[in-house]
Image: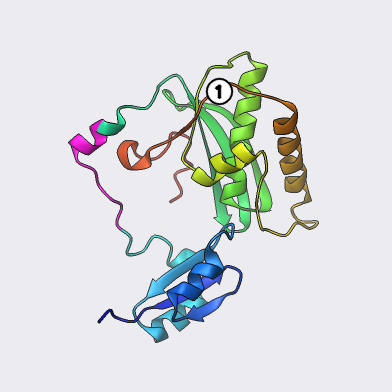
Amino acid sequence: MAKKKYYVVWKGKETGVFSSWDKVKKLVQGFDGAQYKSFADKTEAEKAFKKSYKDYRGKDTKKPTLSAKEKAKYGLPIAQTLSVDAACSGNPGKMEYRGVLTDSKKEVFKMGPYENGTNNIGEFLALVHGIALLKSKGLHKTPIYSDSKIAMSWLKKKECRTNITFDSTNSELLKLIQRAEKWLKENSYQNPILKWETKAWGEIPADFGRK
């Protein structure tokens, strides 16, 4: 018989301590910036809920390691490319994003920090910023790497599908999102948008190094 687990949802459609994963799934799936974790003990879960997600993020998680043969399947990243990434202190929290040259890690642009943003928003804005910048320089074929599947899906839809609430604290960020969406609807681009394979290549070169 499987051991019973308890789940803490710090950020989702509803927050609290739950004993049903099916319920938790409904609360966090599709919710931008969801924060949750499982615990083996109810008392431990209740204590955790009173603390911050930051205190538990990354604990007891083992990054999968690939063998040399498995890594070989991915090949090597393309050197002459742009890599983009975002960082967020809290979710929502202070968010910033940047783009660097993949081979040299030379910073090409850096924006923020912006109040009450999310990592997904930053990843999306970084992609649009990178595409627009490359287009302005006539670099229509230069690929862009991102490690965010969510941001890449938003890019395809030409829409930032965030669930956060906008108010006076993050109105500047809302304007950036609207401008990015407008640019995507009014412009075309040829730059290949490629997934950075973290498990094979390590952290993306644009990573802020705050994990």
In-image side of 57 versus 161 (left or right): left
Q: Nearer the viewer, residue 155 or 124?
A: 155
Q: Position of residue 32 (x, y in %)?
A: 59, 57
Q: Quadrant of residue 134?
A: top right
The quadrant of the image that shows the N terminus is: bottom left
The number of callouts visible is 1
Q: Quadrant of residue 71?
A: top left
Task: Please tell me which residue is depicted at 43% across the width and 51% down the height of the picture.
Answer: 211
Task: Please tell me which residue is depicted at 46% across the width and 83% down the height of the picture.
Answer: 46
Q: Position of residue 138 (x, y in %)?
A: 62, 13
Task: Please tell me which residue is depicted at 44% across the width and 74% down the height of the picture.
Answer: 21
Q: Quadrant of residue 5?
A: bottom left
- Up the image or down, 144 lies above or below 61; here it is above
Work out which residue is located at the far top of the displayed protein and give it.
138
Residue beneath label 1, please? Answer: 191
Residue 50 visible in the picture: no
Mark 1: secondary structure: loop
In-image side of 165 versus 69 (left or right): right
Residue 19 inside the magenta-drawn segment: no
What is the magenta range? Answer: 62-72
Task: Please tell me which residue is depicted at 59% across the width and 34% down the height of the picture.
Answer: 127
Amino acid carrying label 1: it is: Asn
How packed is label 1: few (under 14 Cα within 10 Å), some, or many (20 or more)?
Answer: some
Residue 65 inside the magenta-drawn segment: yes
Residue 129 visible in the picture: yes
Q: Position of residue 20 (x, y in %)?
A: 44, 78
